[in-house]
Image: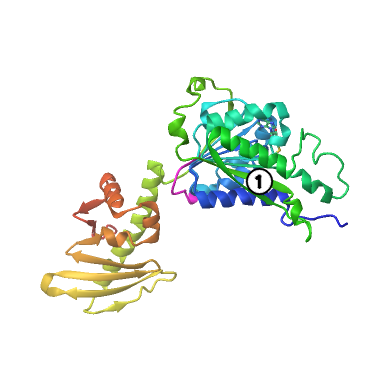
Amino acid sequence: MERIKFSPPLYKQRYYFVIDLIMKSQPKKVVDLGCADCSLLRKMKFQQCVEELVGIDINQQVIRENMYLLSPLPCDYLNPRIRPLIIKLYQGSIIEKDPCVKNFDMASCIEVIEHLELSMLEAFSNVVFGYMTPHTIVISTPNADFNRLLLGLTGFRDRDHKFEWTKTEFQNWALDICVRYEYSVTFAGVGSGPAGTEDVGFCTQIAIFTRMPARNDRWPNSNADCDDIHSYKLLHEVKYPSYCDKNIFENALINEMTYWTEKIKKHFLNSTEQGDTKNNVQQDQESNEDVSWCSRSMEKHCVNWSVCKSADGYLEVQKHGDTIHIPLDQLFTILEVKKICSSVVRLKEALLEIEQFEIAGDNLVVCICDNEK
Ligand code: SAH
């Protein structure tokens, strides 16, 4: 019998399984129970749907040694998130209650339950399914049936494992949980054996529990009496830069508006100097210019229409004497503006609040007096 080699390694397959679940169910609040060195949390933080990420482990040293890996990087400041993200790491035991993880959308508990004494499992189920009550809970544990395929293995897969369950044992436990706490469950796994061993199942067995829709109505505010007891210790808390932060949002918007208004002003100043002609199609001559212009004078109405063509699309602006009117819905076609502001209404509200911008109706008004002259 040959030694089985999992590719990608089994631990990564487990993490990808959880990430895949996050991508499918789009949870906002996720807690990783038994997060150890925060490896899974470091993958979860890239999921844009997640706004609150919590890790809990009984071993505070392993958290302390790795927690800074979850801090924002310079690139996170350069490219802020659309939605907020706060990450909190706690030292605590998952057989104890703490309101900081109540009613999350998703909880993961990857290769942890087998580290608990069998006598503690009752308290674990009561805390997770009866008190925390996340909408989805994904639990993985070794499949003891698979152990006979693991060459040279005697006893458990890890010295700290208190038990390893067969498929039947795990599924019976999970089904019993469902009856008692009003959850449903599906079974899956990662790490397949060689052809012909399919009946053994996966090397890692996984249960995905989903809370029954009416469960919380029937169990209103279960265990609320424990809500004052805080048994977890907060070790680390970080907030990621996001456009939900007023300063970051306004700075990004000011940068973007300044870039475009300067470009538009420059075009009009140049075309005045060159004596703009009717139906003139003008390519900006400067090197690395990323826009081109098409201008049309309508002398009868004393209005100059100009169309600025950029990678994002067209920006149709009007010149009235010394001012340029840029319709807000045109500005909203700029990809970066669309990313920062979720709607034209939000763009207008934000520009109205920023003193340096003038809004008339649904236009941004820019004066083209040449300050340098
Ligand atoms: N989930 C991680 C780590 C698995 S190792 C991963 O998949 O990589 C098991 C982890 O569970 C260890 O870090 C251990 O400290 C933690 N653990 C064990 N008992 C615990 C308890 N009662 N409460 C919280 N964490 C516990």
Local secondary structure at mark 1: strand
Left or right: 65 as drawn, with respect to 297: right
Q: Is residue 114 left or right of residue 301?
A: right
Q: Is residue 62 above or below residue 357?
A: above
Q: Is residue 151 above or below residue 141?
A: below
Q: Where is residue 50 drawn, in percent x and y?
A: 50, 45
Place residue 237 in its image quadrant: top right
Between 162 and 357, the one lying in front of the other is 162
Residue at x 58% of width, y 28% of height: 127
Looking at the image, can residue 35 be seen?
Answer: no
What secondary structure is the magenta-colored segment mainly? loop
Amino acid of disc 1: Ile
Residue bearing mark 1: 206
350 above or below 291? above
Instruction: Report if residue 84 lies within the magenta region.
Output: yes
Where is residue 95? Give x, y as percent.
Answer: 63, 27
- Residue occupying image coordinates x 58% and y 22%: 231
**Magenta stretch, residue numbers:** 78-86
Quadrant of the image for the N terminus?
bottom right
